[in-house]
Amino acid sequence: MANIKLSTQYKREHKKDYGHEKIEILYQDQWIVVINKSSGLLSVPYPGSKVRTAQSVLEELLRKQGVLNSKYKPYVVHRLDRDTSGVMMFALTEAAQKQIMNTWHQMVTERIYRALAENPVKNSQLPNSGLIDDELAKNSHNVGFVPKKDDLDKFGHKFKTVPARTHYKMILKGKTHTLFELSLDTGKKNQIRAHLAAHGYPIAGDEEHRAKTDYFGRLCLHARTLEFNHPFTKEHLKFEVPEPSEWEDYVKKGDFNPKKTLWSDTKIKKSNSKNELQLGQKRLSRKDKAHLNFIESGKKFR
């Protein structure tokens, strides 16, 4: 059995719409559909998975419309992380998918994200706006991060990295948190989360990058705006869904005595570990423990 994140296990037990998250169709024509995806819903299935996704929910809606068939159905053109909410697009024909993917960087003129992030414990070197261009690597759990110069993988080799560029500006600065607006030159896995965490601003609710606050019970990252030239009609389209208004209120108020996050609570960790073993998960060997990834061992992003 694969490891289950503590936050995921908690949501299974307490999140009212867990496994029933919805999407909202913002635009639909014969070639494309634009949706608003809920946090907690996978964009597309991973190999071998039958879990509910934005793609499968969209198929259900098209089926109810009576238009779903082998040639008119959702085709993937980009993704949002499971816990990221917001605007995303699907192609509705194979030809549209090919056209969009071949011209993505030319047709898409703006993708804006908003993120609610924790302030650094120490003074940050980030100015109020700028570009983060640290190269990204992936750890053994396929999580994107910014490696330090001396970081080595479990085989003792330097991590393979890829270029990544994130433009940012601080929309609202509070005593404990900051609201960021971000746009991407590159769309690498976990790019925004990794870039902000590497500079001392982990996104609230980000278990993977060891955030210390989880007031909203979700990753506080939202794809707010998608603006593009239609791949066939050439019409300029813009879709915008604001992030939750509570995020701004939270920044203004501050969170000076935050509750422990699930992933930092030792008691919950021990309880979860026992439950996983009861479900048939093998106890880690010394060799496996030695290869625990950098995030779980707590040796990075400090």
Image (cartoon, helix red, strand yellow):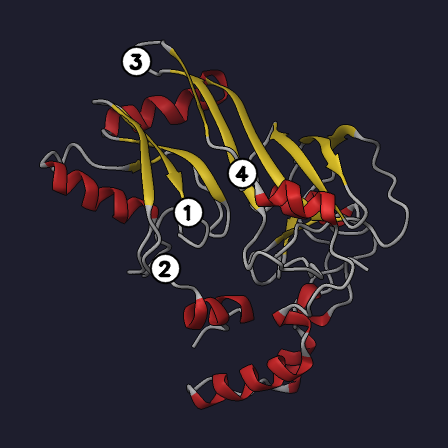
First in residue order: circle 1 vs circle 2: 2
First in residue order: circle 1 vs circle 3: 1
First in residue order: circle 4 vs circle 2: 2
Q: Amino acid at mark 1?
A: Ser
The secondary element bearing badge 2 is classed as loop
Whether residue 184 is visible here, answered yes or no, is yes
The tag on residue 232 is 3
Give the number of the mark in front: 1 or 4: 4
Q: Which residue is mark 2?
A: 17
Q: Residue drawn 44% across and 17% down?
A: 107
Give the number of the mark in front: 1 or 3: 1
The tag on residue 243 is 4
First in residue order: circle 3 vs circle 2: 2
Give the number of the mark in front: 3 or 2: 2
The secondary element bearing badge 3 is classed as loop
Q: Residue furthest top?
A: 234
- Residue 87: give x, y in percent of width and height: 44, 34
Nearer-the-camera pick, 27 or 74: 27
Q: Amino acid at mark 4?
A: Glu
Quarter of image, res 170: top right
Whether tag 1 and tag 4 are in contact, CB under 8 A, the answer is: no
Question: Mark 3 and mark 2: span between their CA atoms?
Answer: 37 Å
Relative vertical location of residue 295 with respect to residue 246 in this rendering, above or below: below
First in residue order: circle 4 vs circle 3: 3
Question: Mark 1 and mark 4: span between their CA atoms?
Answer: 11 Å
First in residue order: circle 1 vs circle 4: 1
